[in-house]
Amino acid sequence: MTATAAKLQKGGAFLMEDVAPDTIFSPEDFSDELKMIAQTTKDFCENEIVPNIEKLEKLEGTLNEDLLRKLGDIGLLGIEIPEEYGGTDLPKTAAMLVAEGMAVLGGFSTTYGAHQSIGSLPTVYFGNAAQKEKYLPKLNTAEIIAAYALTEPNAGSDALGGQCKAVLSDDGTYYTLDGTKMWITNAGFADLFTVFARVDGQKEKFSAFLVERGMAGVSTGAEEKKMGIKSSSTRMLILDKVKVPAENLLGDVGQGAKIAFNILNTGRFKLGAGGLGGAKNALAIATKYSQERKQFGQAISNFGMMQEKLGEMAARIFACESVIYRTAGLIDEAISDSKDGAFKLKCIEEYAVECSIIKVLGSEVLSYVVDEGVQIHGGYGFSAEYAIERAYRDARIMRLYEGTNEINRMLIPGMLLKRAMKGELPLMQAAQGVQKKVMDPSLEEQNDGGLLGEELRAVKNLKNLVLMLAGTAAMKFGAKVDTEQETMARIADIIIGLYASESAILRVRKLKERGVDTAIMEQMTKLYTHNAVEEAAVAGRQAVCRLTEDEQEIAVYMGALKRFTRHATVNTIGLRRSIAQSVLEATGYPVTM
Ligand SMILES: Cc1cc2nc3c(=O)[nH]c(=O)nc-3n(C[C@H](O)[C@H](O)[C@H](O)COP(=O)(O)OP(=O)(O)OC[C@H]3O[C@@H](n4cnc5c(N)ncnc54)[C@H](O)[C@@H]3O)c2cc1C
């Protein structure tokens, strides 16, 4: 890591603290090793996935499994597996880069993620020595393929509500598992399932088991007929009196929730990175099409409304990229080359708020980009003959799995408030501090006069806005704040917008200090921040009206809201046009490492 970290920012602290630009990590800090991993992934996708898309989409033969094995051969399955079991145990940034690169085909990247991430990591982080010895070397090469089986027909978001049951035999040698798991990625060919079940049917004994396909009573349903990611296998997993040896209990009885949620958390930042990769890919496809398609005697890329889309897509991608790798840097810096799995998990958990932000932002930037990509294609975007049609369908799942975006939106302020209550984050003190700014207009945030100073001032104001809203919500609703979902979701959106804007601003400042030509990045940051502030103004107004009905209070909060969302006038139409020129020159995302 080349960014000089003076002091590592704690998870969630971005809401209260300012950080120096040179402390944040960004793609420009990638080591040669990371660049090589990105290139290896790109080459693999170009040579092995792209030529095989049609076959993969039909789930023909054993192509998915064969490709996973090839990935094992080139070392891309073991990036989070300890070296003693054959892996390379690389920084989390590497895992994010591979997830980003793998996103050229949504289906295969899901297959990859289910094996490499949520399928293998339960054993990496919670397995005992014998379990690791038995399974990890084979997972590293895809000699066995993994799947993660948490969801049930009646337990999705409420994952702990599952009914799958495990009963220990009288002699204590095996558990009998019964139940059905739903939507299990890789189920068509996986050999090892991490299955979650309640021991004796008791919720507090929710536990995880390593279940092999070959165990009697294990079967799978038919392939689900899905809207997208057709190249990934998704089936039910049926467990009918499956005798699972007691030594295949993962962790302790009752540790299932800890395992399930920690693993999902480690999946979220990679999922966001996948969204980023998919968005870059879709932008390239749409840009190329806009240059080739002629209407009214000219390329449609000449038209203002087409350029507006390209400019906006690029700006969102830039902000998303800045957030993802800033957070990757924080996680890796915290891990600081430790090989201790429990410590690593703690470091990732520290940034759970940021991981949820990445999941929501990555999946929604992708959704936006593929949707506008279809629009740029006109009627051809609706044709299965065009790659953008598949990208559009494949993108939709990203907002649903590994915690729906609603669940993640609730987690963002929910986890922040929880940490504040535990005394881990001085959120309430900061919220009280902001009350002074709410009452006193003379305590305005100032432009520091630096590059993008107006944007940084706007971000500081958005932090004030969040603290005002979250503090008021906590006071008004107390322990019931969780039930104020709509208000919490609006606060989450402001938080996402400000963290992304700040990450982009700091990245640009850092690069400018290094002498990099940041002109295009400055434009994208200005545009993104402007949008974030405008959206925050709307969300903030709605939240204030929910938080109080007292007219005097409303007047005070509305006055503060107006100040906290004040922003210099920006020619956003001109900015999008200008950014689009760079997108057209690059035939895609205009920032290269
Ligand atoms: C293609 C595919 C692959 C998948 N792969 C896997 C896998 O490999 N392993 C696995 O275990 N699972 C997998 N899943 C399951 C996936 O994680 C769940 O579908 C997801 O968690 C949502 O659960 P659900 O579908 O039951 O929706 P529900 O939980 O029923 O949600 C329906 C709607 O209600 C909302 N909602 C639910 N609870 C709340 C709440 N408290 N507050 C506000 N809104 C709420 C949701 O956000 C959503 O909009 C996969 C799903 C699909 C479609």
Image (cartoon, rainbow, N blue to C red):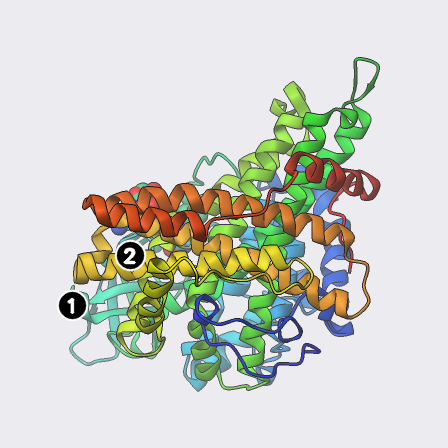
The amino acid type, in three-letter code, at marker 1 is Asp
Q: Check disc 2: other Cα within 10 Å, few if <14, some if 14-19, many if 20+.
A: some
Separation of residues labelled 2 and 1 (CA atoms):
17 Å
Which residue was labeled with disc 2? Answer: 159
Q: Nearer the viewer, residue 57 or 340?
A: 340
**Residue type, label 2:** Ala
Which quarter of the rendered picture does the C terminus lie within?
Answer: bottom right
Q: Give percent across and percent down for residue 36.
A: 77, 68
Position of the N terminus, as image quadrant, is bottom right
In the picture, residue 514 is in which quadrant?
bottom right
> Badge 1 is on which residue?
200
Viewer-side residue, 352 vs 192 = 352
In the image, 145: left or right of 524? left
Residue 68: % across, % down: 62, 59
Q: Position of residue 23 (x, y in %)?
A: 63, 75
Front-most of residues 575 and 104: 575
Q: Secondary structure at mark 2?
A: helix
Front-most of residues 192 and 108: 108
Mark 2 CB in 8 Å range of ligand 1?
Answer: yes
